[in-house]
Amino acid sequence: MDGQRAFFVFVLLLFILLSPDRTPRHRFPLVVEEDLAAQREREFNLLATAGYGQLEQRGLNLSGFRQEDGYRWDLLKDARELSRQQRLNLWRGLDGSLSYSEITGQVRGSFTRSDLSSTGRLPINLTAVDPRKAYVSSVWQRNITEDKGEISLILRDSPTTPGSQREPKEIRADLGLYVDSGPGNGWQASLQGAHFAGSYSVLSTSSTKFNAVPAWPQFALDSDGYAAMKLLNTTLEKTWDRRSAIDDLEQIGLPDCELIVWLVPKPLGLSESHVRLIEDELVHPEGAPIGQPPPLSFSAVILSPDCGYLLQADNLFGPKAEAYIRLADRLLMAFCLLLCLQIILLKRQMEKAATPSKRSRIAYQGLVISALGDGLMLLFMISLLMLDEAGFLVVAAASFLSGIHVAFLEVKFVFDIWTVQVGDPARAEYERQRRSAPPQTPAPAPTPTPASDELPRPATAPRLDGATPIIITSDGEEEERPPAGRASFATIYSRFYFTLVCLMFVSLWALSWPRWLRSWYANGLVFAYFSLWWPQIYRNTMRNCRKALSWEYVLGKSLTQTVPVLYWYFADGNILSIETSPTSAHFLLAWVWLQVAIMASQQFLGPRRFVKDSWCPSAYDYHPLLQDDVEAGGMPIGLVASASEAKDKEDVTRKVFDCAICMNEIDVPVLSKTEPARGTTWLERVNYMVTPCRHIFHAACLEGWMDLSSSSNAIEARGKGDELHPDVVRGAQPEFQGDKNPKTGEIGGPKNEPLRWGPSGEWTYNGRTTDF
């Protein structure tokens, strides 16, 4: 079956690779292209004969510019007046050279809808305006009806050549308008226009129902700009793409609100020489001390003549393209350093959790949560690697480190822990059934029957011994079974990557959701990503385990995992222009450190200090409060009498014992029968450990010994499943030989209960699973 799948994939790849790359034929005949070329010739002849201001007076013979088309060209005068007023207020008494001559970059801000805008729908007959295109819907796209919203502009300016600083240049932009009624990624539009360096820029959309390129000079703020833009349009005729008009005819007939944008730059507050030095250093870095480059800043006026609205934005700002790339490289380098730190921390934790006993305490669910979040970051890096070629090396390095961290370390560690804990649910169910089963009463002794005349059964007669029969096939070989390890390995890897791919597709789908829903989804993902320690807290409580992970890993992981995410919540000028939310950031940060604080309380105060006993299964406590009660028999073995008598003279609440590993004294607090525990007594419990055999150890001694191996000179366990007599722990002779107590006749007992090394790396005592 696997061979058939591989063959099918091979044939599919061969078909894709060998398929000819044919350019699809255009469905428009050559006559359409000839008509468009002739139309363009007429339009540029109109451009040469029209005068400034003719559009407002009697219109132009262009699609969307005729008076009978129904567009609100009366708003053009108001829009130009608003833009002139912005320019006058910003540049009164200043030279235009105090701003950037090249404005490639990304700006963002908010806008308001002017009261001059139309309140209803304009009576526009699209069939008359654009008869060559069939519109399938009467709902207009990019129609802004809200009073306010957000705007983003990605500007791509033409490079400035020497001696042409004052001449207009071609400029392109991608505009995004974000309102509550719009789609999740906002209303998008592509703009093209002219940039007057040090003065202003004017851009517009263009389509078959809005032939704006020949009418660009009519959008100028004064007659000088009109003459310069006429010259610019003449030169643009050489680079006109004839396919653009045909492609617009092929698009789905959804009417879009056309847009005209005026951008007025704001003064930088620097001298002309300093501004030129900053621009030269950004384009050709030589190490000049320019400091932090000032951002781009504009005021904007936006007019939609066919939808009849006027928008005004007073503060659009953002970084220049060169400064943006530099900031992105620095952030990626910082992310690489954080990834290296996470890899080091995870490797050290994997080395410390090399034994089954250590792995059985760790909750792999928390590692899965962390790995899924890091996997989404890895997929984002791979997508960025395919889209952006500028910072290829840095993005490739970040993708490589992220892949090593997720695929080769986190998922491998999850699998190692899962193989140890895979039988936990079955064992828990068995233990639950065993506890709930009714006690069995001993069967009555059989009544002796009188001797019969039958002969006794032969000694070779089969007897029932309770063993499970093994059925052997006819060829004498046992039936082969698939190895469970390989199936488990494939299962956990396939589940993880399937979940990761599903999360990726849902996240891509979420980009088209409304902004409020997309924000809820993103915050939910971050909240789940920051909840990585709750599974460990739950496992510590259920197993009565104080410490499973090193504090080096817990603190380091909490810091390195939260810093990259919280950057988007705190930084106002982040590279993705994501709206900040310091309140949400503080809540998420408190959520993470609340989990860390609970884990600290579990170590120092006990994992079940604030949990009812009825909520958890019974488990042995290795850090008990010692009570000086002879009847209860709770005092450990190894009391140093002379030292304790001397201690009693000073403080009756303390005793001295002998550690069974290092053979040094342990000074521990001991409570009387009626004395309540104090705060210091609860905290001092972490310094010693008492095993089920009632021997006391330094906590560091026993944990350090068990970190090295499950067998030692002091604790002789020959392997998993071997029983260990408690008195052998100290290397001393037991009070009686064997497991049977000659005084009571019982096996083991409260003082001499045998320990067993369990299958998952834990000690079992009297049928109960225990842990350090």
Image (tube, rainbow, N blue to C red):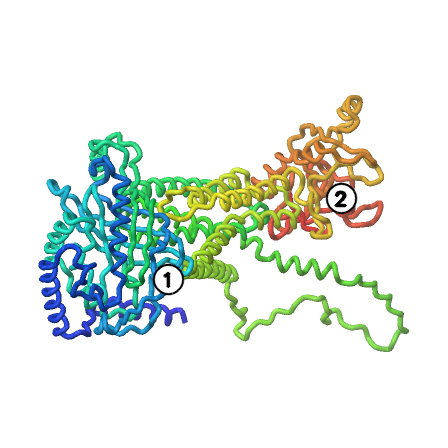
Residue ID for mark 1: 119
Measuring from the top left, give residue 658's x and y in whole percent. Answer: 71, 30
> Considering only vertical position in the picture, is 441 above or below 644?
below
Q: Nearer the viewer, residue 615 or 177?
A: 177
Q: Is residue 699 visible?
A: yes
The reply, left or right, for residue 46 in relation to residue 84 is: left
Where disc 2 sits, the SS reads loop
- The residue labelled by disc 2 is 752
Seen from the viewer's position, the closer of residues 556 and 246 is 246
Q: Is residue 205 left or right of residue 487?
A: left
Percent coordinates x, y for residue 469 in the rendering: 64, 69
Q: Which element is circle 1 on?
A: loop
| Lower sequence index among marks 2 and 1 | 1
Q: Nearer the viewer, residue 109 or 183?
A: 109
CA distance separating discs 2 and 1: 91 Å
- Residue reaching furthest right? 450
Is 368 drawn above or below residue 552 in the view shown?
below
